[in-house]
Amino acid sequence: MRLLSRVASPLVTLLGVSTDALLALLRIKPAAEVAVSEDEVNLLVREGLRAGVFLPSESNMVERVLALDRIPVRDLMTPRAKIIWVNVDDPHEAIWHRIVVSSHTTFPVYEGNRDHVVGVVSVKSIYANLAAGAAVHVRNLMTPPLVVPAGLSATTLLEKFKQSGRHVALVADEFGGITGLVSLHDIMEAIIGELPTVEMRARPRALRREDGSWLVDGMLGADEFERTVTGFPLHPRAERDYETFAGFVMRHLGHVPQEGDTFRLHGYDVEVIDMDGHRVDKVLLIPVREPAN
């Protein structure tokens, strides 16, 4: 091989020089060679994992960081149906309970309808005003929203967060409607943990809270609700004219609910805490505490 290399060296040099000369005459700049490719980096990391240089968690994080530029924002966002919305004209008393029972820290603020987002407000800013004894007005506490397209890559979104100094962005579809919310926390989850699918994020659920209450998505199926929240039976299957827990609430009330509607059943105070148009979005089940004798 060394002898063949020496014999072919003049020919290789001649071909290289002639190619460079031809490209110069045509004013074409030769493409810069990539020193290290992404596949080579992954290969080195895997070799380091076998040699014990890297921990498995470190190897996984490196691979996920390199994959961020191929992950669109739509795969990271919290879908629209899971967002807790705040009306800019609602008084503090009307929104505080909804904010407290949710697990979110930032809330989009809309005016008129939910596609007309005028800002975002954080629990931290509301708490700060309460601690200072000042009146809470959402319009004074909200910050301008950062809106990004659904197809934007996670890497580009991270750069936008760094440039704007914000940690939350609203996601818009091609028609200009708001389809979800994405945060810096979502990007960190994509790096340090398993990336959940859109279906997993959008799946309705019932969440048991520390005080024994249940926060239930209205779109949770009736059968799954009964399996999750034991001790709260719904109608027998043959008598049901609904498929979700929201349908059960509407049947029990006998009308399209409004935020704040309540009733007592099976040892729980059932309260509708959020509506999405005419659809029941979030329901809170609070155990009735019997007074001590």
Image: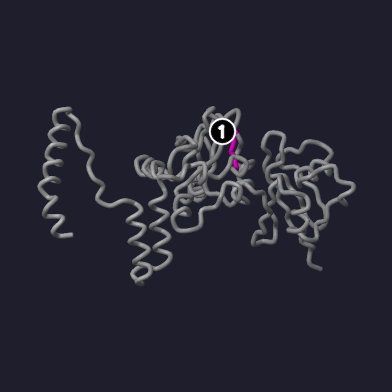
Q: What element carries label 1?
A: strand
Q: State the image coordinates of residue 263 (x, y, percent, origin top left).
A: 80, 48
Above or below, 169 against 104 in this view is above
User: Would you name the residue on which mark 1 appears?
Assistant: 110
Q: Residue at x 74, y 49 (%)?
A: 221
Q: Does the magenta stretch include residue 144?
A: no
Q: Give the range drawn in magenta.
A: 84-89
Report which quarter residue 115 is drawn in.
top right
Please name whichever residue, 139 or 226, is drawn nearer the observer in this view of the structure. Answer: 226
Q: Quadrant of the N terminus?
A: bottom left
Question: Which residue is most to the bottom?
Answer: 52
Classify mark 1: residues with Cα within 10 Å, few (<14), some (14-19) or many (20+): some
Q: State the image coordinates of residue 5 (x, y, percent, origin top left).
A: 15, 55
Q: Which residue is drawn at 54% across and 36% down?
A: 109
Report which quarter residue 41 is drawn in.
bottom left
Please name whichever residue, 93 or 16, is drawn nearer the observer in this view of the structure. Answer: 16
Q: State the image coordinates of residue 124 (x, y, percent, origin top left).
A: 49, 49
Please name whichever residue, 221 or 105, is drawn nearer the observer in this view of the structure. Answer: 221
